[in-house]
Image: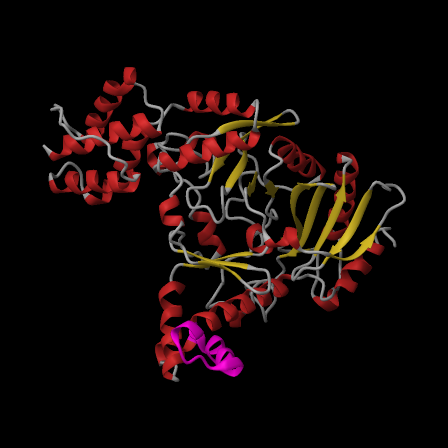
């Protein structure tokens, strides 16, 4: 039967790519038979011949569906269970990771990433097909075709919750191997921050290279305080080749899993880290750090130095100053009947100068004019991006909804024809701005014009999120906290 050929090829793949040993091969094969509901097995002559994991799974799925082994709606969980059975168990993965880490943290994370790709947890083949470009203004713009679009923050939160209470949310460690969320292929490794137990895993639909999350083993709400700054530095001490950051712990400006404390990071240098300093300030009590107003589209302060305690304590001064800051003329109200509105998104990277702690100042206040958020993407840009502007986008990497791939192609066709059809009326601003700058006459010109316009809109969205209008306003805020030239 063809199904046995597909199974034998996957066993061969696992032996070559997933460290399946000969001693465990029959056991793994028998587990696949159980997953597929097969009561017998006939050895085939099929051998693994270098096919990708998606090709192997695609072939297995096609045969299984044709033979009625499971209904199509069960395919995702069945294929996840197949791969989970072929992978090393979590303890073995962690043991190998720890052994490699002893001589090279970078090689250890590379091994775990490659293993997660080989096990089909990280969907790299799909990720590589996502449109992406680096813009002239320094931003990176991507269209994520795999990620669902959540225009309503409440739906975003519900999309990451788990009905029934187990696991408590989509990032709890109990998800490792859990069939109910198709997590049989998830593998994590343990971390320690201070005396707290955390763990690291890669994101299946990562927004950038080696995108992963560090998660508190205890299901506790997200928060940012002085201890958070120490934990972030703990992480880059352990993995100096990565950056790490934390979403603001508030709806509309934070992540979609606010119920569980976690960080995001990975192996890519995001645009914010390349930004320069518009103004440098110092502090008598902490002479070993520099406080800089970042030359950035949003409002961000960079604290640089080698002393961990100084970095954390200065960061806490700024955080406390911001969460209580009031400027009613600008609509900056720290707290009202709807709760707290000000928070920071910290993100840190190690450089030759020591730690660079970047504090992005955020506010989730709303108004009658801006019911989705005063310091959020304004309504004229919602056709491009209405979802929350979280940590990654605040650092200059925009993740736009998958629907745009087709919609923008239609807008480009309209540009070349010279008329925007009624069904694309929501793109009127984008269409008119491109034509005002330079009407494209070829597909290549339309492609370039569209990239420039998207980058411009993303820049303006970041400026919408800026809580201070100018660098001078940010400097004035910092001076009010005791920092000076």
Q: Which is the main secondary structure of the residues drawn in magenta? A: helix
Residue at 28 percent of width and 38 percent of height: 77
Q: Is residue 447 left or right of residue 259?
A: left
Residue at 52 percent of width and 83 percent of height: 436
Q: Nearer the viewer, residue 485 or 321?
A: 485
Q: Is residue 220 left or right of residue 383?
A: right
**x, y percentage for residue 239?**
60, 33
Residue 12: say if magenta.
no
Residue 337 appears in view:
yes
Q: Which residues lie in the magenta part?
A: 426-446
Q: Is residue 115 left or right of residue 216?
A: left
**x, y percentage for residue 209?**
49, 45
Residue 228 in the image: above or below residue 365: above
Q: Is residue 396 left or right of residue 94?
A: right
**x, y percentage for residue 118?**
36, 35
Q: Nearer the viewer, residue 181 or 145?
A: 145
Q: Furthest residue to the right?
A: 284
Residue 166 appears in view:
no
**Colouring method of the image:** secondary structure
Q: Quadrant of residue 286?
A: top right
Quadrant the C terminus occupies: bottom right
Q: Quadrant of residue 163?
A: top left
**x, y percentage for residue 108?**
51, 29
């Amino acid at each position: 039967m063809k199904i046995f050929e597909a199974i034998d090829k996957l066993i061969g793949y696992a032996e070559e790519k997933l460290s399946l040993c000969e001693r465990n091969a029959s056991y793994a094969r028998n587990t696949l038979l159980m997953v597929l509901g097969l009561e017998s097995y006939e050895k085939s002559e099929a051998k693994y011949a270098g096919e990708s994991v998606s090709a192997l799974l695609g072939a297995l799925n096609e045969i299984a569906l044709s033979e009625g082994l499971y209904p199509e709606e069960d395919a995702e969980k069945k294929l996840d269970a197949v791969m989970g059975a072929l992978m090393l168990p979590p303890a073995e993965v962690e043991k190998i990771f720890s052994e490699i880490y002893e001589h090279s943290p970078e090689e250890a994370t590379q091994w775990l990433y490659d293993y997660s790709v080989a096990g089909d947890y990280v969907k790299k083949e799909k990720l590589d097909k996502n449109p992406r470009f680096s813009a002239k203004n320094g931003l990176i713009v991507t269209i994520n075709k795999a990620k669902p679009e959540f225009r309503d923050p409440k739906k975003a939160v519900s999309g990451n919750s788990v009905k029934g209470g187990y696991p408590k949310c989509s990032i709890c460690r109990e998800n490792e191997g859990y069939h109910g969320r198709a997590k049989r292929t998830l593998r994590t490794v343990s971390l320690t921050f201070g005396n707290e137990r955390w763990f690291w895993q890669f994101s299946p639909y990562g927004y950038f290279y080696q995108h992963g999350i560090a998660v508190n083993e205890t299901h506790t709400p997200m928060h940012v305080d002085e201890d958070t700054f120490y934990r972030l530095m703990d992480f880059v001490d352990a993995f100096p080749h990565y950056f790490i950051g934390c979403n603001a712990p508030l709806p509309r400006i934070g992540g979609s899993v606010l119920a569980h404390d976690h960080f995001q990071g990975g192996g890519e240098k995001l645009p914010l880290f390349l930004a320069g300093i518009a103004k440098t300030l110092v502090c008598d009590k902490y002479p070993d750090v520099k406080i800089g107003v970042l030359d950035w589209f949003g409002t961000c302060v960079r604290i640089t130095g080698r002393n961990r305690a100084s970095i954390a304590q200065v960061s806490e001064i700024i955080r406390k100053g911001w969460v209580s800051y009031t400027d009613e003329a600008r609509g900056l109200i720290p707290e009202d009947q709807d709760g707290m509105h000000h928070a920071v998104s910290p993100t840190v990277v190690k450089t030759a100068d020591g730690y660079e702690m970047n504090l992005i100042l955020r506010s989730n206040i709303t108004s009658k004019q801006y019911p989705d958020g005063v310091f959020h993407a304004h309504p004229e840009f919602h056709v491009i991006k209405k979802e929350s502007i979280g940590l990654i986008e605040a650092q200059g990497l925009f993740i736009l909804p998958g629907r745009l791939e087709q919609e923008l192609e239609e807008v480009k066709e309209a540009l070349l024809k010279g008329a925007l059809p009624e069904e694309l009326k929501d793109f009127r601003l984008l269409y008119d701005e491109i034509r005002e700058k330079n009407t494209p006459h070829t597909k290549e010109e339309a492609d370039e014009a569209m990239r420039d316009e998207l980058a411009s809109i993303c820049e303006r969205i970041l400026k919408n999120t800026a809580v201070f209008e100018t660098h001078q306003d940010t400097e004035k805020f910092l001076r009010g906290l005791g920092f000076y030239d």
